[in-house]
Amino acid sequence: MFRWVLLFVLIVPALEIGILIWAGGVIGPWWVVFLILLTGIIGAWLAKQQGLDTLNRARQSMSYGQLPHEQIFDGICILIGAVVLLTPGFITDAIGFLLLLPFTRGPIKLWLQKVLKTMMDKGTITIFRR
């Protein structure tokens, strides 16, 4: 897992810089700046909307006495998506929007649950219950 994070931290910024330079040459630097600002604004709005919706669904689940496990994974995806959208670049924006949109977040949540279950089975991560 650590090596994937390391690769992400090293490779993605280099790719982002290359794409930003290429896009600046194709559409112009001011349009690139405009697109970065626009995706940031739309991403912040979408993160707020999705976060509030997830929080309301979690409250509703808890009021019925149910554990809001789906909403917890939604919240994790929304948080990661919002943070990734803060970094300028088109690759990170695409990843951020994939994590924020509910219909694309579903498969990512299933993958995240599988990874977490595998880590728990291997003993890599331990979750304590009271």
Image: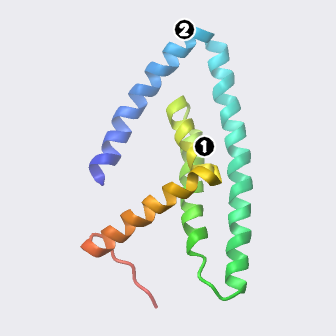
Choose top left, top right, bottom left or bottom right for residue 7: top left
Choose top left, top right, bottom left or bottom right for residue 31: top right
Q: Residue at x 72, y 85 (%)?
A: 63
Q: How far apart are labels 2 and 1 at the CA level?
A: 25 Å
Foreground residue among 119 and 45: 119
Instruction: Say left or right for 62 vs 15.
Output: right
Q: Residue at x 69, y 45 (%)?
A: 44
Residue 105 x, y percent position in the rendering: 57, 54
Q: Is residue 103 above or below residue 20?
A: below
Residue 64 x, y percent position in the rendering: 70, 87
Query: Which label was assigned to residue 97?
Result: 1
Q: Residue at x 63, y 85 (%)?
A: 66
| Kind of residue at badge 1 | Phe
Residue 89 seen in render: no
Foreground residue among 14 and 69: 69
Query: Which label was assigned to residue 25?
Result: 2
Instruction: Say left or right for 71 vs 45.
Output: left
Q: Nearer the viewer, mark 2 or mark 1?
A: 1
Residue 29 x, y percent position in the rendering: 61, 13
Binning the other alpha carbons within 10 Å of mark 1 as few (below 14), some (14 to 19) or many (20 upward) gives: many
Q: Is residue 11 above or below residue 113?
A: above
Q: Is residue 62 above or below residue 42?
A: below
